[in-house]
Amino acid sequence: METYTIKDIARELGISTSTVSRALRGSYEINPETKRLVMECAERLNYRPNPIALSLKGSASRAIGVILPQIANYFFSQAINGIEAIAYNRGYHVIIFQSQESYEREVANVQQSMSRKVDGLLMSLSSETADVAHLQEVLDKNVPLVLFDRVSAELNVTKVVADNFGGAFAATEHLIQSGRKRIAHLTIQPWLSITQERLAGYRAALEKHGLEFDESLIRYGTFGPDEVGPMVDELMRYSSPPDAFFTASDRLAVGCLQALRQRNLHIPEDVSLIGFTNLNVADFLAPPLSTVVQPATEIGQIAAERLIDQIERKHRALPIETVKIPTELIVRSSTRTIDQNEPLVYASK
Amino acid sequence: METYTIKDIARELGISTSTVSRALRGSYEINPETKRLVMECAERLNYRPNPIALSLKGSASRAIGVILPQIANYFFSQAINGIEAIAYNRGYHVIIFQSQESYEREVANVQQSMSRKVDGLLMSLSSETADVAHLQEVLDKNVPLVLFDRVSAELNVTKVVADNFGGAFAATEHLIQSGRKRIAHLTIQPWLSITQERLAGYRAALEKHGLEFDESLIRYGTFGPDEVGPMVDELMRYSSPPDAFFTASDRLAVGCLQALRQRNLHIPEDVSLIGFTNLNVADFLAPPLSTVVQPATEIGQIAAERLIDQIERKHRALPIETVKIPTELIVRSSTRTIDQNEPLVYASK
DNA sequence: ATAATTTGCGCAAACGATGTCGGGAACGTT
DNA sequence: AACGTTCCCGACATCGTTTGCGCAAATTAT
């Protein structure tokens, strides 16, 4: 099956390429009969317009770029599914780039997607990204941009995020209500919006319940391997060590679980553990892990919808807003209130 | 930061675009002094060649396409990481497409990547794919193609796969050696190469140990939601029900775990469970899940290397071969030999 | 000094599609 | 009969880059 061009159709029918082009795009100034012939011939040859040529011409490429830190991450891979679903049935293709949490690679990704002439960009910032000049340039070029999850306050664009404050508040309050008093918070880089919002939610819940906010119970992780162990060690050495851990990501939740287990700290007997994560196996862990679930797929869907709306109504400026999606608190055994009579068993319920 | 073209450089220096083009590519027929000027100017303007124009011309796009069933899957997302790592430091960009286990979408993805003029294609077949004519076309166009994991015997191309036979053999033998006699095998679509190989490994291990191969203990899954429950029900209704489950994928392993738990079947007391999976939390599940681990990252890396080798030495035909990467059997509690005296506890070890 | 090479560079065509012109034919209007 | 319209359609330029060909100047050979 060869790949035919507009020229082949033109030659076949003995007309000019312009006519073919116009017929294909349904221009009003083409004879219906000619149109029919062209359409039929295109069909017969299985003609597909060359997206590269289209992009070169500067017209729509019907592709959107997605730049995110890591695919191998529940949250992001689910978000991609949401994005693809929407993009697919609105006729767009999705080109995925991973920044690998590197600012440098993120900038390169942005350049790549610009030169590949995507119609719009969907981004979640790398953990290294402090400066957003590269994104300002995108906006200056008038390329629609929507941020999701890891957003920047410095950019005046549409953003789609989970209700991080609310989720963190709910998680913390839940820990307090189940009898915990010294709640450690393991989180990620402090300059990220999500970190700040979750921290604020955590703090607000403490304050509401008259608990002191203790800076020394907060630990900021990077994305290094086995970084949680040392944090746990430090924290547990305190004269009044934490009786609960609230972690801010998939990785930290699992890392914390592992670290606690290695140190022979029992959950929830010794400490409670709750994660801010999208782990789909949370229910099958030992112990089943309480989590704040972010609707990753939905975030992806809404972000994609907003972006495509912007692309298609490019002339009329669409309102810029921040969409906040509610999170859901799912309570499992890892944050159970301890009844001293209960046997120490994690059997399936 | 504007985006400059070769023309801008030409105008700036008062020379022709051809000269600039040749200078940039280091042609021998350009005066070294002119070259220097051009290089310097390009540097100063931060010139980046337009990949779209390059692709249109038909030359290398320095991009490779990756088409796989699902990103939201441990195995595939790790494989992508391996692919990206190699591609990145050999100067290629990776364009990822998801077939979503749909033949139709896979064909569309192939078309897309062809028309985006990727320099090569890395693929893992969708579970619906029985016919590979669309891939034969890729080969006919002389576009390098490497298959990984889900490969097709009908295509004469380089393939990179895990040692599915060996892994399945090891898993089955392990179950037998831990005292199991009726081993059920939950697997995926029967026409996939990996399914067949794993089944063969399973069967060979049974035969080696003098156990009967019982067709009725095999179940072929699709990718539907909660399909495992009914399978388990059917199997457990047998007069001699299975005493072990060997599952062939991430999804099936977790699904099986869930189904068994819901039916109050204890692992490993009532039945053993071992998965063929890349779940990174296998050790934290209740019970910790024995698994056959596929080196996903390595598979991705090797596949990417082979592909890029083929792209770059396109003239000399590279030998076509199937690379088989060893798998690793990791034994955890879910396949423990049952000691009747032991209490029924899944506590952390 | 003349002829033959070499060196360095520009012109123009191509890649596939779109869009701006403008022109011929057929029609209607005075 | 002469003019203006409308309807269809084709020639050509364009997007950014590469490349075959050719041509002038500089160099070397005769």
Image (cartoon, coloured by chain):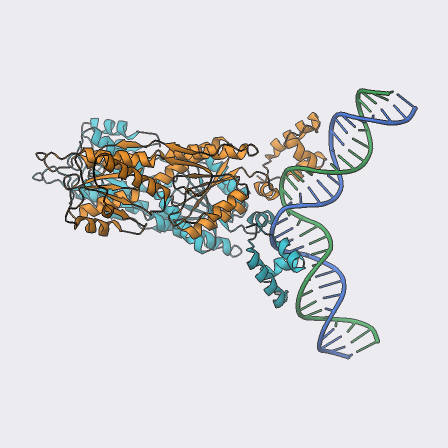
Chain colours: A cyan, B orange, C blue, D green
- Residue B322 at x, y = what percent? 42, 34
* A120 and B262: which is toward the camera: B262
- Residue A54 at x, y = what percent? 58, 50
Q: Is residue B149 left or right of residue B279?
A: right
Q: Is residue B252 left or right of residue A98?
A: left
Picture quadrant of residue B209: top left
Q: Is residue A289 visible?
A: no
Q: Is residue B154 visible?
A: yes
Q: Quadrant where the C terminus of chain A lies?
A: top left
* B163 and B229: which is toward the camera: B163
Q: Is residue A4 above or below residue B160?
A: below
Residue at figure coordinates x 48%, y 30% from the top left: B89
- Residue B136 at x, y = what percent? 49, 45
* B37 and B347: which is toward the camera: B347
Residue at figure coordinates x 61%, y 63% from the top left: A37
Q: Is residue A54 left or right of residue A203?
A: right
- Residue B276 at x, y = what percent? 29, 38
* B224 and B185: which is toward the camera: B185
